[in-house]
Amino acid sequence: MAASGAFVEQTAYDLILGLRMGRVVSRALHVAAELGVADLLSEGPKDISELAAATDSHPQSLDRLLRMLASDGIFAETADRGFGLTPAAELLRSGVLRDAVRMFSDADWNAAGALLHNVKTGEPAFKQVNGQGFFEYLGTHPESQTRFDRAMASAAEEENLRIANAYDFSKYRRIVDVGGGRGGFLAAILKTYPSPRGVLYDQPQVVEHPHYLTRAGVRDRCDVVGGAGLFESIPAGADLYVLKRVLHEWPDDICEGILRRCHDAAGKDGRVIVVDAVIPPGNHPDLTKAVDLLMMILLDGRERSEADFRELFARAGLKLTRIVATPSRLSIVEGEPA
């Protein structure tokens, strides 16, 4: 019994210290992505001197960083002081998750360090630290905006077709993608289902070049409408309104207004679906819970549970009919007029 108790105590001790060091691991991952190490290893392992020269890095320091990441399965240390790719490291290559890992700048890291302010006041730490809201900051820092856009695009391309195949969009005549950006998700829907027509709706400068629709060969089945976005009237007359990765950026009162405008546009026979993460119940580890904390740090938004969505839909005059899991981290939350 004593040995078992000691083991449990040590495991809990290691858990706390491991989490305490999480910021170091996260930053190391960011640095490896920033240096483009995975791209350099795409044709096979390289020794540390080659990697250091190619990244203009201090050899011993780079070696220590990659050694630590290799201990977590990211990169593989070779017998001759070199490193190669693992399946996890493959994801750090350009065009996969490299942009997503590089997305956060010092402004974001510093905001995470001010989490106590967030918890004490309910105000986003990002604004308190940087003097601007997150999206305002992106608007005045072009490099950060570019990284953010690339990260969002790479994540969306990975998941769009899988989400489109998880729900039967063929039964709808006209689908409006509200806040649909440059049309990636709508393109996946229209390419998968040949009968519906689409409407891509977002701010004029966003929808000016809907290259995803063109690339997918569905531009002729889609109207592109520029407007005030989420905060004024939404094009009416469709039987399905889609909000993908939109509501989690906003607090409940704003989300209620967005959903109500979609409800009004859809009429009594239309449907509204929200494509977002749904926080599961219980104490099991889930990435969505960490993302929810990140949303709290950066914005006034939040990830939501099924109960949260049910309440939010009801406030907007909608009834949550079902939640459809997808092969991605996101689910499809379906609503109809109450």
Image (tube, grey):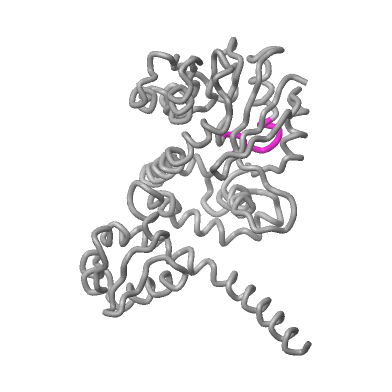
Q: Quick check: 168 left or right of 3? A: left
User: Which of the two residues, 323 or 202, is positioned nearer the viewer here?
Assistant: 323
x, y percent for residue 73: 44, 67
Which residue corresponds to the image point at 46% horizontal and 22% vertical from the top-left? 190
Q: Is residue 254 magenta?
A: yes
Tell me the chief SS of the magenta region. helix
Kindly identify the residue that appears in the image at 52 percent across and 32 percent down: 165
The picture places residue 129, in percent across and down from the top left corner, at 55, 54
- Quadrant showing the N terminus: bottom right
Q: Position of residue 236 (x, y in %)?
A: 59, 12
Quadrant location of the C terminus? top right
Q: Residue furthest bottom?
A: 2
Indicate left or right for 313 with 206 as reference. right
- Judge left or right: residue 33 versus residue 188: left
252 drawn magenta: yes
The residue lying toward the viewer, choosing from 165 and 252, is 165
> Taking 153 as reference, is 281 above or below it?
below
